[in-house]
């Protein structure tokens, strides 16, 4: 199939997702000179349509296409939400043996999300009309046969080190103005958390970046804006036109804010452009030490442990037992929920509490935030 024929066919197509997905993928294989799943793997053991997959946290699903070691692929109908398709794939990733590429398409656009271990995430957006360009088809060809060619050049560890180094400059600047060390460390970790929260969509879209951009022009106003944001995060509430969820844990136990200069706000605004969803959370401990003693700047390696080393310990010792316990508790919750009477209700709440503590122990299972916290506390008070 020629690029021109492929583009025309799928520009004109009005069929819905289910009836179009496999035909679109087969046509793409013809365009790229690749075998289809049934041609390459008749048994469907490593390359197939409708790959059954257990969702992280429970439940069953199907990836529209899966090729071992290459990609998971999810389709949506024209104009549908491809971010939702990506979230579906991310939920299947472990069951799909953690493919390095997560690809989504609405028949008019193909988006390749890289998901290599210890590498920052990269995104390649290929509109239908761009498939006439050899360089765009080459990216898709690599996805099928040589995904390593799409690996981003910067590692997660490298990006984390860069972020930690730039935050160290901020810590030194604050310490040079004789702010108390514990106060500096606490304040830096608040700022750091806000950067993570924005990129992970725990804060409304770009609310923190917009605050920093405004503060760089008017530092006095910026300090007040930070206080207002911290106050909203401490209890949940409004920040301008945005509604902020409640963040517990003590990080936002007050609205204490250090007065930053215009240059310091500019430094933070530049930091907000980094992909914080790809930065290791281990940076929190490093920055706390940095805030207490910036002379430790040269000791980053002593305080920072890369994700792979951490996960080699956490997976078998903590995460896998928690996942197994979570499955057992969910089954018991479902069983208790179908029964009537006070005794069954108490059992249901008891298992719900157990699920809460399990979720607190595992970020992948953490459902105990925001509205879920409030519902749980209200239920607890009624018992």
Image: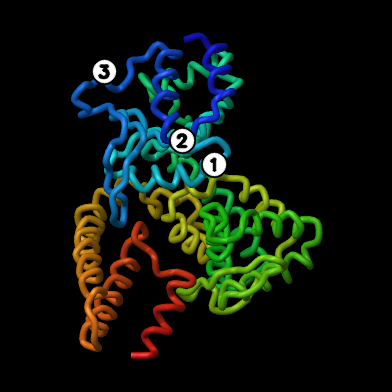
Q: How crowded is mark 1: few (under 14 residues within 10 Å), some or many (20 or more)?
A: some
Q: Which residue corresponds to the image point at 37% horizontal and 14% vertical from the top-left?
A: 34
At numbered mark 2, what does the secondary structure look like: helix, strand or loop? Answer: helix
Decide which of tag 3 and tag 1 comes sooner along the chain. Answer: 3
Q: Do the residues labelled 1 and 2 touch (CB within 8 Å)?
A: yes
The image shows residue 39, relative to residue 68, as above or below, that is above
Decide which of tag 1 and tag 2 comes sooner along the chain. Answer: 2
Residue at the farthest top position: 2
Decide which of tag 2 and tag 3 comes sooner along the chain. Answer: 2
Determine the CA span between mark 1 and mark 2.
Answer: 10 Å
Residue, disc 3:
40
Q: Which residue corresponds to the image point at 40% horizontal and 17% vertical from the top-left?
A: 29
Determine the CA span between mark 3 and mark 1.
Answer: 30 Å
Residue, disc 1:
80
Single out the mark in the foreground, 2 or 3: 2
Q: Can residue 86 be seen in this view?
A: yes
Q: How crowded is mark 3: few (under 14 residues within 10 Å), some or many (20 or more)?
A: few
């Amino acid at each position: 199939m020629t690029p021109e024929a492929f583009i025309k066919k799928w520009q004109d197509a009005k069929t819905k997702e289910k009836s179009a997905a496999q035909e679109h993928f087969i046509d793409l294989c013809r365009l790229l000179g690749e075998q289809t799943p049934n041609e390459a793997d008749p048994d469907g053991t490593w390359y197939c349509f409708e790959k059954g997959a257990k969702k992280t946290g429970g439940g069953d699903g199907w990836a529209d296409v899966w090729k071992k070691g290459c990609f998971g692929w999810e389709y949506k109908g024209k104009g549908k939400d491809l971010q939702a398709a990506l979230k579906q794939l991310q939920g299947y990733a472990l069951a799909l043996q953690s493919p390095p590429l997560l690809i989504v398409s609405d028949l008019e656009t193909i988006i390749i999300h890289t998901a290599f271990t210890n590498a920052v995430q990269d995104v390649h957006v290929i509109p239908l009309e761009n498939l006439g360009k050899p360089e765009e088809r080459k990216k898709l060809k690599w996805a099928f046969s040589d995904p390593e060619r799409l690996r981003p050049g910067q590692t997660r560890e490298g990006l984390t080190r860069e972020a930690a180094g730039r935050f160290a400059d901020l810590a030194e600047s604050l310490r040079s103005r004789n702010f108390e060390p514990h106060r500096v460390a606490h304040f830096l970790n608040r700022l750091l958390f806000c950067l993570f929260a924005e990129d992970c969509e725990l804060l409304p879209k770009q609310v923190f970046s917009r605050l920093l951009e405004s503060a760089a022009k008017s530092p006095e106003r910026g300090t007040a804006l930070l206080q207002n944001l911290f106050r909203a995060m401490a209890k949940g509430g409004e920040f301008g036109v945005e509604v902020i969820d409640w963040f517990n844990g003590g990080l936002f136990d007050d609205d204490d804010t250090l007065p930053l200069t215009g240059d310091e706000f500019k430094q933070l605004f530049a930091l907000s452009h980094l992909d914080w969803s790809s930065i290791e959370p281990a940076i929190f401990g490093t920055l706390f030490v940095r805030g207490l003693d910036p002379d430790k700047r040269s000791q980053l390696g002593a305080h920072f442990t890369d994700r792979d080393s951490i996960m080699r310990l956490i997976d078998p010792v903590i995460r896998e037992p928690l996942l197994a316990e979570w499955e057992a508790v969910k089954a018991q919750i479902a069983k208790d929920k179908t029964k009537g009477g006070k005794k069954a209700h108490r059992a249901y709440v008891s298992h719900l509490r157990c699920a809460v503590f399990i979720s607190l122990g595992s970020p992948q299972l953490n459902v105990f935030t925001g509205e879920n916290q409030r519902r749980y506390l209200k239920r607890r008070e009624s018992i």
